[in-house]
Amino acid sequence: MRIGVRAKLVLISLLILVVVSFGFTLLGLHLSRTWVEEDLRERAVFFARELAATIGDHHDLTPGPLLDRKIQQIMKVRRSVLQLDIVRFASEDASLLIATSRPQSRLPFTPGDTDRVQRGRIVSRLVKSAGGERHWEVMAPITLDGVVVAGVAAKFSLGRFDAREGRARTLVLLLTAASVLVMGLLMGIAVHWIVKRPIGRFMRAIDAVARKEPAAVNLKSADEFGVLGGHFDAMIVRTQAFNEELRSKITAATEELERRYHEVERLHELLFATQRNLSHAERLALSGRIMAEVAHEVGTPLHSVMGHLELLREDLARDGVTDGAERRLTIIGSQLRRVTEIISQLLDLTRRPPEQKVSVDLNRIVRETSELVRPVASAAGVSLHVDADAELPRLVGHGDQLQQVVLNLLTNAMDATPRGGRIDVATRGLAGEVTLEVSDTGCGIGEADRKRIFDPFFSTKEPGRGTGLGLFISAEIVRDHRGRIELEGAEGKGSTFRVVLPLGRDGA
């Protein structure tokens, strides 16, 4: 579902409101709870001190019905007091309970608490029982003649405060939620009025422009939307004027193009009439040679791509290729083969002018081309090894053409080498020349075929696997570089093609 700008703004604003409002509300409730707890503690301490002050002499600390009745009266008046104990300090480490409201249990004050009370301090702590109820336990000293002789221990319940605090917290959270909803509603109305309406006008104007209808935003406000709307309307006016001018120029250009087209058509007819005077045999030979050369040039990278595709198919097969993926891989392979066929049929009959020679690093060309064909060699089970001379000087030539020579030699070597064989590529520099050798452990070339191996359209491969132009093109490129290409080997013992190129004026 698509969410508009207005909805996003409202949602973000609501989220911020919820986080901020509830955060401050919970903080306020926590502070209020802390303050009230502290107030109740002070009240408990005040009560304990007040009760200790009512004991004026040792006679009031005498155990008996009078003291017990006094404690019961206090318990009836102070309903928040859960237990009241009066202890007498027999020594520094011992205390004696002389009166209590609950004889079955004594408030659990430690000897350390008793020691602090004997020194005139008041002990207080907030205790939470196993049932979740909370209470304050307070002990205040009873001083007679300047000496602390006893202590008043009281247990004050926080049950009523917790109940009221829970109801107040629920009410405050509900009010906070209601305020957030109200603020969100008001913010949504504000966003609709301030943002959505102007944006809606822009969208309607854009739709009108797309439908090629008169369009305008017409925002009269003084805010940013109004300024933007004014610029938008001005841009639409300029665009319409530009379109009119462009249409008129297109009309004039179309008329000029039509005139030139008729002139080109006349020249074309004249050229065609001239071409018809050429020898039919010569045209067929030239066309076939050029088309075969270009098909070979373009087909070789396509074969490399198909080799990578087969490697991808094998990698996917190890992980369990799905029927859908297998079907797509089959379609890709068939379409690549179809592209190869179409290229060989639809080539133009022109040759590119020769490029200007530059300084060339033959080692880099050998390494890059070897890495290009290495996946295909691996798929065919043939190992490829490169031994490049690190001190090999640079030569002057055409890098792309020399790469084509290396690619043709490697392709022929892979076609001639059976599975488990080896191809070695080496470069050497000696006496102002650079040597490239490509050796294979394939079937070799017979003596009769070696005499024609560099002839055009001659191939020892099976029908459909080559055009017979790879070595011919390579030999032509080497001759253009004032070099030579040689063949060594015998039938059944593999072959070695050696390319020798001069360094040229830039060589070292």
Image (spheres, grey):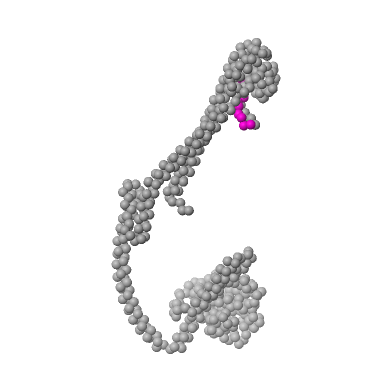
Q: Residue placed at 53% from the left, 73% from the top?
A: 335
Residue 420 on image: x %, y %: 66, 74
Asked if residue 495 lies in the magenta stretch, the reply is no
Q: Residue placed at 62% from the left, 21% from the top?
A: 154
- Looking at this view, is 168 or 283 the one in front? 168
Q: Is residue 413 above or below residue 135?
A: below
Residue 227 on image: x %, y %: 33, 50
Q: Is residue 239 above or below residue 256?
A: above
Residue 51 on image: x %, y %: 59, 17
Q: Residue 417, located in which quarter of the rendered image?
A: bottom right
Q: Residue placed at 43% from the left, 40% from the top?
A: 183
- Looking at this view, is 410 or 272 the one in front? 272
Q: Residue placed at 63% from the left, 17% from the top?
A: 72
Q: Is residue 457 left or right of residue 381?
A: left
Residue 119 on image: x %, y %: 63, 19
Asked if residue 136 lies in the magenta stretch, the reply is yes
Q: What predominant SS class does the magenta segment belong to? A: strand
Which residues lie in the magenta part?
131-140
Can I make out residue 507 in this image? no
Number of dots carrying numbers: 0
Q: Is residue 173 left or right of residue 196?
A: right
Q: Is residue 127 above or below residue 188?
A: above
Can I make out residue 405 in this image? yes
Q: Residue 147, located in which quarter of the rendered image?
A: top right
